[in-house]
Amino acid sequence: MGKRHVRKMLRKMESGEPVELSVSMTTMKGLTRLAFLAQQFGYEYADLNQVDNRFALRIVPDPSREGRERAARNRERYPDARNGGSLPPVAPDEAGLLKARMLFDLGRQFTDKQRFALAGIPITGMVAGIGYRFGDGTTGVVVSVGVWAALMGLAYVGLVASRRRHVRYTAQLEAAGFTPVTDQGGRLRYVPPGRQLPGHGNPFA
């Protein structure tokens, strides 16, 4: 994640209002770095979703005493951060937990059934195109059914792998003392020890 995105985020944070960043062509490492830096300057990670081919990262002001003190220290140490100056170094352990939390949230955007159905829509469309190319003959039907079954099988394998990753993220977060909570939409989330979901008891969110 380049300094341009960091500058843009820090300048938006000057409003003191919740900020949503729409980012494409990035990696989880880059998104985690953005969220980590936001937490160094008075904000906290709130949520991560994917819309089409873009990620929507939401951050909100952190009203906690610890958050305010950390922000004050970092504004003093890195006064030119918003203009492309030096930035706080990323702490690997803290960033690792933040990444696990973000990936857990991203994976909970849809249920397993919804993800399987969403995968099936483009697969079915592609297979229909293959069938059209072969015409209405038996060969076209056999090829189309075979391709559809193979691709849906791969989609199921991907779903199983996703479940295993979520088990790993859950174990990592719970071992660090993170607490499972349910948000207003019924989605399971994890919050740091002693904290609430952003927006619950937070006068700034």
Image (spheres, rainbow, N blue to C red):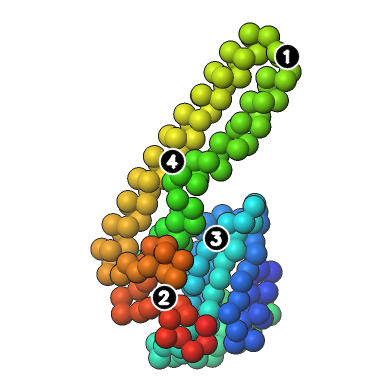
The alpha-carbon separation of the residues under discs 3 and 1 comes to 40 Å
The alpha-carbon separation of the residues under discs 2 and 4 comes to 27 Å
Looking at the image, residue 14 lies above or below residue 172: below
Give neighbour class at mark 4: few <14, some 14-19, many 20+ (Cα, 10 Å).
some
Q: Residue 149: image x %, image y %?
A: 51, 24
The alpha-carbon separation of the residues under discs 3 and 4 comes to 18 Å
Q: Which residue is mark 2?
A: 197
Is residue 155 or residue 78 the one in the foreground?
155
CB-based contact (under 8 Å), mark 3 and mark 2:
no
Q: Amino acid at mark 4?
A: Leu
CB-based contact (under 8 Å), mark 3 and mark 1:
no
Marked residue nearer the N-terminal end (3 or 2): 3
Is residue 174 rendered to the left or right of residue 204?
Answer: left
Q: Which residue is mark 3?
A: 49
Q: Residue 147: image x %, image y %?
A: 57, 21
Q: Nearer the viewer, mark 2 or mark 1?
A: 1
Marked residue nearer the N-terminal end (2 or 1): 1
Q: Amino acid at mark 1?
A: Gly
The alpha-carbon separation of the residues under discs 3 and 2 comes to 16 Å
Secondary structure found at label 1: loop
| Residue at 43%, 81% in the rendered image | 200
Q: Amino acid at mark 2?
A: Leu
The alpha-carbon separation of the residues under discs 2 and 1 comes to 55 Å
Marked residue nearer the N-terminal end (4 or 1): 1
Residue 135: numbered disc: 1
Q: Does the image show residue 98?
A: no
Q: Quadrant of the N terminus?
A: bottom right
Marked residue nearer the N-terminal end (2 or 4): 4
Q: Amino acid at mark 3?
A: Asn
CB-based contact (under 8 Å), mark 2 and mark 1:
no
CB-based contact (under 8 Å), mark 4 and mark 1:
no
